[in-house]
Amino acid sequence: MGNTSGSSITIRNSGAVNFDNFTSAIGVSLYVNDALTLTLPALTTFAANRGVNGGILELAGTGPGSTLEFASTHIHYRPTGSQRVSEH
Amino acid sequence: MNLPALTDWNDMGNTSGSSITIRNSGAVNFDNFTSAIGVSLYVADGLTLTLPALTTFAANRGVNGGHTWNWRATGPAAPLDLPALTTINGPLDHNAFLNIESVAGGTVDLPAVTQILVPAGFNHLARGVRVLADGVDSVVIFPR
């Protein structure tokens, strides 16, 4: 709700996070590096926030084998306001 | 350090200077500590930092921005364990961040967190909550 582009989840260098029950993300960038996989099996809503001043929300997998995986069968994506989503 | 009667720690100074650190065989007892505002947490050296009663955390305003609060577990068998924490509130002012980090095999265990919020704040410049897992066996655990 901060309408910023500062929140993020990052995994790299064999690190891991468990977000098995994470259902809704608003204004959160996601970064995967070093051939890891970040899976969000329960995520059904992904939205940019208002993004005053035009922040960029990023979905980024860097390097071969780095995978950002949304296991849900349906994700509701809402771009809003002035914020852009950059998919790498 | 044994402070079983401590229930609230509120850094109303809107700074990022308050912290709890255990290392090199140190220990703290904050068994009834339920609310923290603007407090960083650090654990290393194979120790465990558990705050069993902590239910709410908020970064404070961070006047003039640029403040960072860290929860960091460094190295194997050194978990930062917050079993009752349900809500994390991020910072309000610009260029201010709460970093939740497991590094070099560390574990941050947040099994009850259901919401991470960055409230509408005093301006709209960058701020937020950042989660990082960096290194072999480094893990940040949210509810399963």
Image (spheres, coloured by chain):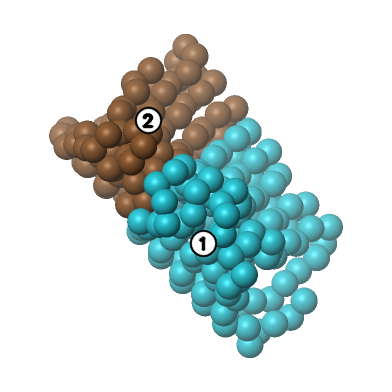
Chain colours: A brown, B cyan
Q: Which mark is residue A74?
A: none
Q: Residue shown at 56%/59% (left/top)? A: B62
Query: Where residue B113 sits: x, y (%)?
Result: 41, 59
**B125 or B101, nearer to the observer:** B125
Q: Helix, strand, or loop for circle 2?
A: strand
Q: Is residue B78 left or right of residue B96?
A: right
Residue at the right extreme, as displayed: B24
| Residue to which mark 2 is pinned | A56
Query: Where residue B46 sits: x, y (%)?
Result: 74, 53
Q: Helix, strand, or loop for circle 1?
A: loop
How would you rate the neighbour count of disc 2 (Cα within 10 Å): few for under 14, some for 14-19, many for 20 or more? some
Place residue B16 in its image quadrant: bottom right
Place residue A78 in its image quadrant: top left
Res B43 visible = yes
Q: Residue shown at 42%/57% (left/top)? A: B122
Marks 2/1: CA–CA distance: 23 Å
Q: Amino acid at mark 1?
A: Arg
How would you rate the neighbour count of disc 1 (Cα within 10 Å): few for under 14, some for 14-19, many for 20 or more? many
Q: Residue shown at 60%/52% (left/top)? A: B67
**A87 or B65, nearer to the observer:** B65
Q: Amino acid at mark 2?
A: Ile
Query: Where residue A82 sits: x, y (%)?
Result: 27, 34
Q: Residue shown at 79%/58% (left/top)? A: B23
Place residue A53 in its image quadrant: top left
Q: Is residue B113 left or right of residue B74?
A: left
| Residue to which mark 1 is pinned | B61
* Vertical order, B130 against A85 (above or below): below
Res A46 visible = no
* Vertical order, A53 against B74 (above or below): above
Q: Chain of mark 1?
A: B
Query: Where residue A70 sits: x, y (%)?
Result: 29, 31
